[in-house]
Amino acid sequence: MSQPHRTHDPTGDPLASGGSAPRPRRWATAVWRYVRSAPGTYIWLAILLVTTRVLRHLDPEFEQEFLAQRSTNLHELATNPVRVLISSLFWLDGGGWLNYAFFYSVFHATAERWLGTWRWLLVLGIAHVGATYLSEGVLYLAIRHGFAPGSAVNTLDVGVSYALAGIEAVLAWLLVAPWRYLYLAVILASYGQALISGRTFTDVGHFTAALLGLACYPLVRDRAGRWDPPATVRGLRTRWRRHA
């Protein structure tokens, strides 16, 4: 098939050439290509968008009861563990959907593109399940020794933050040294500071999820050390100058 003829543009603007797509179309194409490269991430985000909108139309009292039945608290883990471990991943309790869309695009999509969908799911599953059980175990001990009330067995605990923390941490293995260690220090300091200052079972869960993400190194070892941020910046600058 013959290619369209590129006419000369005296202004030097490549967008004015007959064979170049308009800039908005190029951006839209790039965004769509990025979304397609991480299907699991964006299907998950789409489900979260729907469930978030559903919650907005529920009566506040019914909403709490509704979420409690999908919560990974001690009561539900004892009676319906598989159901609540899965269902809790599809509801947001606090925090806007747009905030999660940003973090999913930065962390989950990057991890899925790097590891592939199935390995990405395995890592986030390990972080989610492991952190849930360890944090709820801490809560159980607190109840048993009188540091928390017995009603805490029904504490609302839904959301996607444990999985996100695990994925944030495993991405340390994507980076080359020394950037890996700088990134890792930021992740551990962030969740460690929250654990020290908050000392809630969810803080335990987030810190645990990050450690579990790091512990997934055997799953990602064959793909570790692939991203050099300064080299990426230099490449972007070069491309920008070519198209300027």
Image: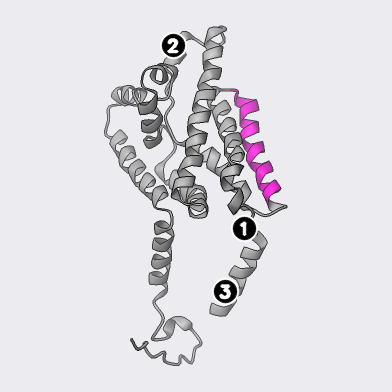
Q: Earlier in the sequence, mark 2 or mark 3?
A: 2
Does the magenta run of residues contain 181? yes
Mark 1 neighbour class, 10 Å CA radius: few under 14, some 14 to 19, many 20 or more: some
Residues drawn in magenta: 180-199
Does the magenta run of residues contain 68? no
Mark 3 neighbour class, 10 Å CA radius: few under 14, some 14 to 19, many 20 or more: few
Name, please, the residue furthest toward the right.
Answer: 178
Q: Earlier in the sequence, mark 2 or mark 1?
A: 2
Q: Are marks 2 and 1 in contact (CB under 8 Å)?
A: no
> Foreground mark, 2 or 1?
1
Q: Earlier in the sequence, mark 1 or mark 3?
A: 1
Distance, label 2 to label 3, CA atoms, is: 59 Å
Mark 2 neighbour class, 10 Å CA radius: few under 14, some 14 to 19, many 20 or more: few
In the picture, which quadrant includes the C terminus?
Answer: bottom right
Three-letter code, disc 1: Trp
> Foreground mark, 1 or 3?
1
Residue 151 numbered tag? 2
Position above or below: 155 against 146:
below
Residue at image coords 41%, 32%: 93
Q: Are marks 2 and 3 in contact (CB under 8 Å)?
A: no
In the picture, which quadrant includes the N terminus?
Answer: bottom left
Residue 175, horizontal then vertical, whole percent: 64, 53
Residue beneath disc 1: 227
**Of residues 44 and 54, the one drawn nearer to the viewer in this rendering:** 44
Residue at image coords 57%, 74%: 239
Is 48 positioned to the left or the right of 134 in the image? Answer: left
Secondary structure beneath disc 1? loop
Residue beneath disc 3: 239
Is 128 positioned to the left or the right of 231 in the image? Answer: left
